[in-house]
Image (spheres, grey):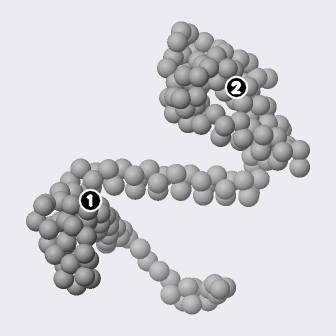
Amino acid sequence: MRVLLMLFLVTTLFISAGCGKVRQGGGEDTEVVAKINNYELTVRDLMNEADFKMSEGYLKEDPFKAKRMLLESIIMAKILLQEAQKKSFDKDEIFMKEIELYWEQALLKLLLRKKTEEFSRRIVIKDEEIQAQFNRMVTEEGDQRPFSEAQTEIAREIYNKKMQENLNEWLKEIRSQADVKVNEKVLNKVIVAQ
């Protein structure tokens, strides 16, 4: 229970610190900022953590305090991680499954973000498309708004539709290229509770 409380406190520190970027001000990347038992926290490690956890606005208010708070939260997290490793929690089957799930979700999120960015650069919305959609809304739905009010919303809807179409096409394409074999006999034996 105490470990959970400490993890909560460390997480709270991370959340209160926000996320963003920090600019390095002195020190070589490999210089050791702090030694935590057998772990050496380098300038590069600190900067990577700062990039991940600190917000620009927070640092502008009091960079020294933010840096100290970040360092203390890293130290506490490392101490807790070392304690968990001493107890072999890092070898626990449930822990390993959680890591695997997190890794898969992070990887999927990155892949989808990259594909979305790629598609976003290719999506073109023509004025004629917006006008045609507006005309449909007026005719079929009885929309009474002026074109100038509806234009941005319509453009967003068209963009989202095109994005979804691109993603669906891409998903169909990679699914068709995959070598998938389903064992129907085994599948029929599986009962999924509702």
Image location (x, y in percent) of residue 194: 65, 86
Residue that protrudes farthest toward the left in the picture: 128
User: Which class describes the residues within 10 Å of circle 2: few (<14), some (14-19), or many (20+)?
Assistant: some
Q: Which residue occupies 53% across, 56% down?
A: 105
Instruction: State the CA–CA distance, disc 2 to disc 1.
Output: 43 Å
* Residue at left offset 74%, top offset 38%: 10
Question: Can residue 42 be seen in this snapshot?
Answer: no
**Of 14 and 110, which appears nearest the observer?**
14
Which residue appears farthest toward the right when viewing the image? Answer: 1
Q: Is residue 184 left or right of residue 70?
A: left
* Left or right of 123, for residue 42: right
- Residue 69 disc label: 2
Query: Badge 1 local density, few (<14 within 10 Å), some, or many (20+)?
Result: few
- Which image quarter: residue 185? bottom right
Residue 36 is situated, as x and y percent measured from the top left of the image, at 76, 23
- Give residue 21's position: percent from left, percent from top: 50, 29
Image quadrant where residue 70 sits: top right
The disc, 2 or 1, on the residue closer to the chain's N-terminal end is 2
In the depicted structure, whether residue 140 falls above or below residue 77: below
* Vertical relation: 137 (above or below) 189: above
Check disc 1 and report the residue beneath it: 152
> Is 144 left or right of 26, judged from the image as shown?
left
Tell me which amino acid carries mark 2.
Answer: Met
